[in-house]
Image (cartoon, coloured by chain):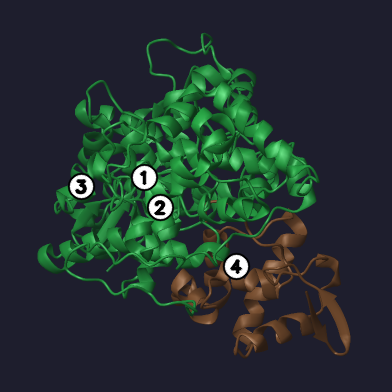
Amino acid sequence: MAIDVDGKSYETDEEGYLVNISDWVPGVAEVMAKEDDLELTDDHWEILNFLREYYEEYQIAPAVRVLTKAVGKKLGKEKGNSKYLYSLFPYGPGKQACRYAGLPKPTGCI
Amino acid sequence: MAKADFEVPELKKHIEVPRVEEGTMAHLSPYVAKPDHQNGVGYPEELVENWHEKTLQAMDDVRKKYRSFQVYLDACVKCGSCTDKCHYFLGTGDPKNMPVGRQDLLRKVYRRYFTLPGKYFPKLVGAEDLTRETLDDWYSYYHQCSQCRRCSVFCPYGIDTAEISMAAREILDRVGYGQKYCNEIIAKVHKIGNNLGLPGPALLDTLEGLEEDVFDETGVEVKFPLDQEGADILLVTPSADFFAEPHVDGLMGYGKVFHEAGVSWTLSTTASEAANFGMFIGSYENMRRISLRVRQAAKELGVKRIVFGECGHAWRVAYSFLNTLAGPFDFLDPKYPVPQHICEFTYDLIRKGKLNLDKSANDEMVLTFHDSCNVARASRMGDQPGGQFTIPREVIKASCNHYVDMHHDTIHEKTFCCGGGGGLLTDDLMEIRVKGAKPRMTALQNVIQENGVTHMAAICAICKSQFSKMLPFYGMEMDQIVSVHQLVSNAIILTGQKTDEDAEENATEEA
């Protein structure tokens, strides 16, 4: 499977995650979101950028609590919870947002 | 909530037995493991060319290795007791999701090649040839079984479909037809130490965050130590406890309980997973390798005790098999059970009056408890029969004022699986997860409507994740599922903790 971004093809796995994380460009997130009928706003990008920064440092997506805390610190306490994250990414911040950000799918009992 | 491309069952007042409809779930199979996932767990990379011969060879090995497997295949008299006991059958009406139907998928091949009447008069005894389609059928329907063992409670011969399902998956793995979800995860545990693939630095960062959070909330420095040599207790908990909600709220509860007990404890980077998916795929070798990590960490850190966090099948493996797989644990303190469940640990402190619990902290909730299948039907807690039912409930009741049980046919040893156990907690199996959750959702909805229940507590990482996904499908809220130790965490007043009264006093003084 693959997605097309600005005329270039990016390989994805059967669940729609990028095969090569280093391939990622912002257009990947835009195209994936469009397929889900979702328009990415600055609020979405705050999350996606954080995910990518965290991944770069730790080679794993942040735990939900790490993510909500970071969001709370940056955007205000009322946004520092999973309800807010689900309002942005209805399929779940861990899975949907990670996919848009080019991160591998989190695995396990989650 | 994610959109469903299948029909979500409608909840009725009672759990009704559906009309039988053949093949309703034949379309559903999970993603097949990739070569590197298969490699990581020691199986062929893809379906081997001589799969026919290898499948029969594997079946022969398994029946010789596990006498129970052959007894189960021989003993069924088709009495029908199990037919309406599986949550997946109740949710789908597919006869291959009846426990006997599921067993028969293997049984007919076993009869054909390993029994005298099956060899000579196959049609008379329901024996069938092994074909390529048989393997696909196995792959599909043995991944629609959560190995919860509810059917075995009702079987007069005690046939355990879970063991048959595990054997089927082992046979499939051995011919190179493994499941992506389980095998990718097991390979991660071997490589990194946990199901998530959470490396040490990320774990440390997460735990430091929790220390900050507990301090902000209570004003008490509760530590979440990692790799601390010489600690008394090694806590082995599902990695979902570090990562997901409401799991992490439970982990904060364990930390507070250890702190209040005044014991030294530690987590381990290398044994940062309680779960043991080796059991799900019926692989003794993988189960053993995962268990040995716990032994090794306990030895290296020099602990005296091992405590397991809230994880269903982990507790089955720990309680029933750990000593065989990774024992003897003669280097641990013999005064304590090896291993001990966190609920036993907390309950013991409650009985001794060592925890200060303010039940009113959970007054906005009316609680019920979901017995997780592997804890309920494959283990025990404490020193009394049925301790696995009473102890978690006693811990909950000591932490809240409002508790109600669900219908008696849906709890204790008759509990219904959450629908996501046994290696099914993956998005590609969402349809069977949703349909299989129906019986539990029915029982929950009844206590919500009749008794004003607001939240359901559980002691299993899979149950918690599954329910937080399932509740919205059935018109409920994802945060209506909570961890048992989350309730403890809410109620516990730590020594020296700042209370609301202190805050009010401070406010008055400042004014």
Q: Is residue A80 left or right of residue B456?
A: right
The tint of chain B in the picture is green
Q: Which residue is mark 4?
A: A95
- Same subunit, labels 4 and 3: the answer reads no
Mark in front: 2 vs 4: 2
Chain of the residue that carries numbered disc 2 in the rendered image: B
* C-alpha span from label 3 to label 1: 21 Å
Q: Which residue is mark 2?
A: B463
Q: Residues within 10 Å of mark 2 (few under 14, many from 20)?
A: many
Residue B109 appears in the picture as rendered: yes
Q: Residue at x 72, y 37 (%)?
A: B54
Chain of the residue that carries numbered disc 3 in the rendered image: B
Tell me which numbered mark, 2 or 3, is placed earlier along the sequence.
3
Residue B264 appears in the picture as rendered: no
Kindly state the secondary structure of the residue where label 1 is placed: loop
Q: Are marks 1 and 2 in contact (CB under 8 Å)?
A: yes
Q: Which residue is mark 3?
A: B358
